[in-house]
Image (spheres, rainbow, N blue to C red):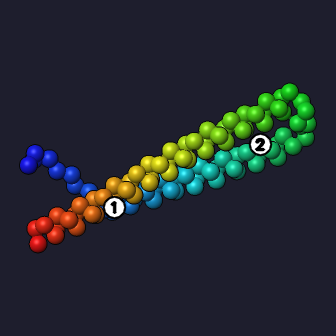
Amino acid sequence: MSGRSLVVRFESLDAVERALTATHDEIVSRLDEVLAQVDTELGGWSATTASRAVEIQYQRHLRESVDRLCRALADVRDALTRVRADAHDTEVRNVAVIG
């Protein structure tokens, strides 16, 4: 035995997963609010003007960046879900071996 140990607190993993979900939802919601406000303020701009075209392009880039961020948050959350499941399976196997 190597003397190494890993302590997994399921409540902590659950809390992190909930925080990641809430963060994702908040980011998406806030971005939608801000961009809706921008669209309201710039509603009179013609999409054919250079400045509006750049703004539209920037909004597209911003949404793509936020989408990548949200996918990364989802990947971390999914990894935590797998860690929690693996930890539970390990605990069950260890109890079975000891019992």
In percent of width and height, residue 18 lies at: 45, 59
Disc 1, SS: helix
- Residue 12 in sight: no
In percent of width and height, residue 31 lies at: 66, 47
Disc 2, SS: helix
Q: Is residue 1 left or right of residue 49?
A: left
Please name the residue shown 55% across and 42% down the image: 69
In percent of width and height, residue 66 lies at: 61, 42
In percent of width and height, residue 68 lies at: 57, 42
Rendered-image quadrant of the C terminus: bottom left
Callout 2 amino acid: Val
Task: Tell which circle, 2 or 1, labels the residue nearer the N-terminal end.
Answer: 2
Disc number for residue 85: 1
Q: Which residue reaches farthest bottom?
A: 99
Callout 1 amino acid: Ala
Disc number for residue 20: none
Q: Is residue 5 left or right of residue 82?
A: left
Please name the residue shown 72% across and 38% down the image: 60
* Quarter occupied by residue 56: top right
Please name the residue shown 73% across and 45% down the image: 35
Say above or below: 1 vs 13. Answer: above
- Marks 2 and 1, Cα distance to the nearest angstrom? 43 Å
Which of the pair 89/5 is nearer the observer?
89
From the image, tell me which residue sits under label 2: 38
Q: Is residue 51 left or right of residue 81?
A: right
Neighbour tally class for label 2: few under 14, some 14-19, many 20 plus, Cα within 10 Å: few
- Residue 90 in sight: yes
